[in-house]
Amino acid sequence: MSLVASFVASSAWWGIAVAGGGLLIGISFFVITSSVSGLSTNRRPAWILLKVTGRYALLGFLAYVMIARLRLPPLGLVLGASSFAVAALVELINNRRN
């Protein structure tokens, strides 16, 4: 999707924005999976809550840096974040055909 966005928009910044959105959703996926696995092992819930809060604060900070400081197009970030859902939809359609 990064290459397509760069080609369609004629700007490398769009491709970087799509990759950044993919990075943000990847970090979010990591936060969710690690917190669920931590809660399922009955470790200290307060420590897990603190880690999740810190990771989401880092995620917000990264989004801020990408939008405000790097001036990446927000729509490109949204496209990158939705790329995982698009990939899952493509896989679902491919599995339905078989």
Image: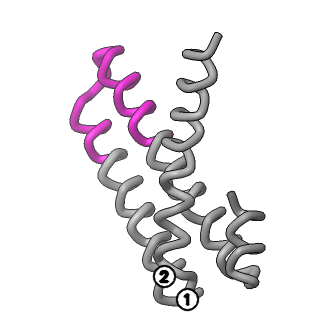
**What's under tag 1, amino acid-wise?**
Arg
- The residue at the point 30 percent across, 23 percent down is 39
- The residue at the point 30 percent across, 52 percent down is 53
- Checking the image for residue 71, the label placed there is 1
Which residues, given as a range, are shown in magenta?
A: 30-50
What quarter of the picture does the N terminus occupy? Answer: bottom right
36 is within the stretch colored magenta: yes
Left-right relation of 16 to 72? right
Magenta: main secondary structure: helix
Rendering coords of residue 87 (x, y %): 59, 39
**Position of 87 relative to 75 (above/below):** above
Q: Residue 10 lies in what quarter of the image?
A: bottom right
* Helix, strand or loop at mark 1: loop
Q: How many marks?
A: 2
Scheme of image coloration: one colour
Q: In this view of the protein, which residue sits in the foreground, 17 or 91?
A: 91
